[in-house]
């Protein structure tokens, strides 16, 4: 796990690459490397920051140059042992034991055809000294980030957007369409980038730069096709042994020359992975979080700690408990800096604090249960959308009467919040809508009218573009299974755009590698071979995953109420952050620039304070957006955490 950067036929490329690599120092504090070579009438410069995980010696250092090929690479290959054996059988001799060298030799033998054979997470740049070509590639599911920017025949790339912003001296323009999308979702979709010139290399794709200026793009893996293949497997009765697939993936993800630990929330996904990991590494450490008692009470949060302790005791896990009582006024600008783009999910703070604690204890690698909810229909929205289909059959007068009653109920008093009322209000906001619109409204922040009322009226066309993009992605499939259509949309948008993005950026801010065994190509193939009726059975989400987990976990853990890997936002907003909210609403840069409308924000604050609506998430995202925008428009590139 590392940070990569480079330039290709870019003015002053060496100095630019040095600056890019320096900005990424937190991603790889164990070493730094540089490489330069002519490329046509220009030069290529590659940079690397190393977080040493496998082959801690210098034979794993990067950029790795060998017999005319040069690689800068961020990630881990979990099938490196098999690829190494195959290459050795073909006569390849290796100098060290790193997966970097395996990847370099696989590229030499198969070129871009090696990419679909890779099982892991990766973003990479490969330069061929003979042809002068540079190829960039990103893993199948978008676990690892790769940002790039092209000007003329030149290209610059890096693991983080802030690096590109820094080296272009504040000359990048904010893409207001991306900001509109971030308001809708509370994150920027992987198809968009917060700066107009920059882009994210799409998951499962590659880009080739030639010395004559031509650029070629290709795709080596497509989730839509995998879902279609899974549907056919299900029709043929070829159902996977899910427990075996997940166990094998977890075993592979333990491959490391340094200590590995796990996130352990006490929920199904992390408990299952921790139990499996403890089989392979007895006495493995796990990290869990708790909240201040008053915050948890106000938020009506479940007591996850007791479940985490139960799992740890049962499987001999060394459990470390961390209380989340952060100085959010200090953490908000720091996290905004590290997240690169406006991401309004406070779970990023949890990830950063857990990884920081693990790193202080000497742990560099963590396993996370990320991805199971998306692939196996574990979110409340999945069940809610299924229930909505039945709700639509209820006579109209009864539905209108129920909506009127729920609308009058408060979501909170001054002493506590009411989660059930919040869920009911949320459900009724989309229950009558068509499938794609209902699914979008079940997890996004605003409907079309509210979003139009919040922003500059001149951006109305942009709102429609963003909504159309969601519809296009959701409807781009051949599936006749509603549950798997939702899972496919989540795996294409929600997973890479939000969860994998904040996990990578907040963990790497703490110089820690997070691995995601559920987000593995073989687990994904198995997931889409499972019919939706086995993912949601009755009112039970992730039913098939729960069946698999009962082979190792007690039923009390498997079938416990779902917890939330989030934060006590309502408590923070009503206490710690209340003065900041007022400042941003009344005199924030986004309001003064005309992007956000002060009157709409005032209404949100008033309704939230009265306890009639829960706008804590919306207002938290306005704060993250404001801090991001201040840094992005400061005229000198992105701010640093020290000056945020």
Image (cartoon, rainbow, N blue to C red):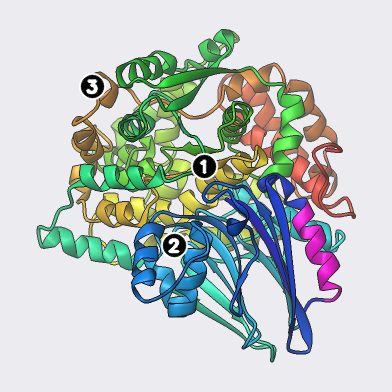
Q: Does 163 sit left or right of 134 as displayed?
A: right
Residue 31 is situated, as x and y percent measured from the top left of the image, at 70, 50
For the point 33% across and 43% down, the residue is: 251
Residue 535 is situated, as x and y percent measured from the top left of the image, at 23, 43
In the image, residue 340 sits, relative to residue 261, either above or below, namely: below
Residue pushed farthest bottom?
212
Q: Answer with mark 3 or mark 2, whichever residue precedes in sequence.
A: 2
For the point 30% across and 32% down, the residue is: 279
For the point 52% across and 29% down, the residue is: 566
**Figure label count:** 3
Residue pushed farthest left?
237
The residue where tag 2 is placed is: 140
- Residue situated in front as seen by the camera: 604 or 240: 240
- Main SS category, magenta section: helix
Residue 127 drawn in magenta: no
Q: Answer with mark 1 or mark 2, whichever residue precedes in sequence.
A: 2
Cα distance in 3D space between marks 1 and 2: 17 Å
Q: Does 622 sit left or right of 419 as displayed?
A: right
The residue where tag 3 is placed is: 554
Mark 2, Cα crowd under 10 Å, few <14 / some 14-19 / many 20+, is: many
Residue 302 in sight from this viewpoint: no
Under circle 3, the secondary element is loop
Residue 501 is situated, as x and y percent measured from the top left of the image, at 56, 48
Residue span colored magenta: 11-22
The residue where tag 1 is placed is: 514
Mark 3, Cα crowd under 10 Å, few <14 / some 14-19 / many 20+, is: few
Report the quarter where the C terminus lies: top right
Cα distance in 3D space between marks 3 and 2: 34 Å
């Amino acid at each position: 796990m590392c940070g990569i950067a480079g330039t290709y036929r870019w003015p002053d490329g060496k100095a630019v690459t040095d600056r890019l690599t320096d900005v990424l120092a937190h991603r790889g504090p164990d070493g730094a490397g540089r490489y330069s070579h002519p490329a046509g009438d220009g030069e290529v410069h590659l940079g690397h920051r190393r977080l040493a995980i496998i082959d801690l010696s210098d034979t794993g250092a990067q950029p790795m140059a060998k017999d005319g090929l040069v690689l800068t690479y961020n990630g881990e290959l979990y099938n490196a042992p098999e690829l190494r054996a195959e290459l050795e059988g073909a006569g390849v001799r290796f100098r060290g034991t790193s997966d970097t060298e395996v990847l370099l030799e696989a590229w030499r033998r198969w070129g871009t055809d090696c990419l679909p054979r890779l099982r892991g997470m990766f973003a990479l740049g490969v330069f061929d000294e003979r042809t002068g070509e540079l190829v960039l590639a990103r893993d199948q599911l978008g676990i690892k980030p790769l940002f790039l920017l092209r000007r003329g025949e030149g290209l610059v790339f890096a693991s983080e957007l802030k690096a590109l912003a820094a080296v272009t001296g504040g000359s990048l323009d904010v893409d207001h369409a991306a900001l509109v999308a971030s308001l809708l979702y509370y994150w920027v979709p992987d198809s968009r980038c917060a700066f107009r010139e920059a882009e994210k290399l799409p998951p499962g794709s590659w880009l080739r730069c030639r010395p004559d200026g031509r650029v070629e793009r290709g795709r080596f893996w497509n989730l839509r096709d995998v879902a279609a293949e899974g549907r056919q497997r299900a029709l043929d009765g070829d159902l996977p042994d899910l427990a075996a697939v997940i166990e094998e993936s977890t075993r592979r993800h333990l491959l490391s020359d340094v200590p590995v630990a796990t996130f352990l929330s006490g929920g199904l996904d992390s408990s299952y992975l921790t139990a499996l990991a403890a089989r392979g590494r007895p006495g493995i450490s796990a990290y869990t979080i708790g909240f201040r008692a008053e915050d948890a009470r106000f938020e009506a949060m479940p007591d996850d700690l007791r479940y985490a302790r139960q799992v740890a005791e049962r499987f001999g896990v060394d459990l470390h408990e961390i209380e989340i009582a952060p100085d959010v006024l200090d953490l908000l600008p720091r996290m905004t800096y590290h997240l690169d783009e406006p991401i309004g999910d406070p779970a990023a703070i949890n990830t950063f604090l857990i990884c920081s604690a693990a790193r202080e204890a000497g742990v560099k690698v963590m396993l996370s249960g990320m991805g199971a909810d998306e692939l196996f229909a574990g979110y409340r929205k999945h069940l809610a959308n299924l229930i909505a289909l039945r709700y639509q059959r209820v006579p109209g007068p009864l539905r209108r009467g129920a909506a009127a009653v729920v609308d009058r109920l408060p979501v909170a008093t001054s002493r506590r919040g009411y989660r059930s009322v919040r869920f009911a209000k949320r459900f009724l906001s989309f229950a009558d809508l068509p499938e794609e619109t209902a699914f979008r409204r079940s997890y996004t922040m605003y409907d079309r009218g509210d979003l139009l009322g919040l922003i500059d009226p001149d951006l109305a066309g942009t709102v429609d573009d963003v909504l159309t993009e969601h519809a296009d992605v959701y409807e781009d499939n051949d599936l006749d299974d509603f549950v798997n259509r939702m899972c496919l949309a989540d795996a294409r948008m929600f997973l890479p755009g939000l969860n994998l993005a904040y996990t990578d950026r907040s963990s790497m801010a703490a110089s820690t590698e997070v691995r995601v065994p559920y987000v593995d190509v073989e687990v994904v193939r198995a997931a889409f071979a499972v019919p939706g009726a086995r993912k949601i059975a009755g009112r039970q989400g992730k039913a098939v995953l729960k069946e698999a987990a009962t082979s190792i976990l007690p039923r009390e853990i498997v079938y416990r109420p779902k917890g939330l890997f989030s934060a006590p936002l309502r408590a923070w907003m009503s206490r710690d952050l209340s003065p900041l909210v007022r400042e941003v609403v009344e005199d924030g840069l986004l309001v003064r620039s005309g992007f956000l409308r002060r009157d709409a924000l005032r209404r949100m604050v008033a309704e939230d304070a009265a306890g009639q609506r829960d706008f804590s998430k919306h207002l938290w995202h306005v704060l993250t957006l404001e801090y991001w925008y201040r840094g992005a428009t400061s005229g000198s590139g992105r701010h640093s955490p020290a000056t945020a």
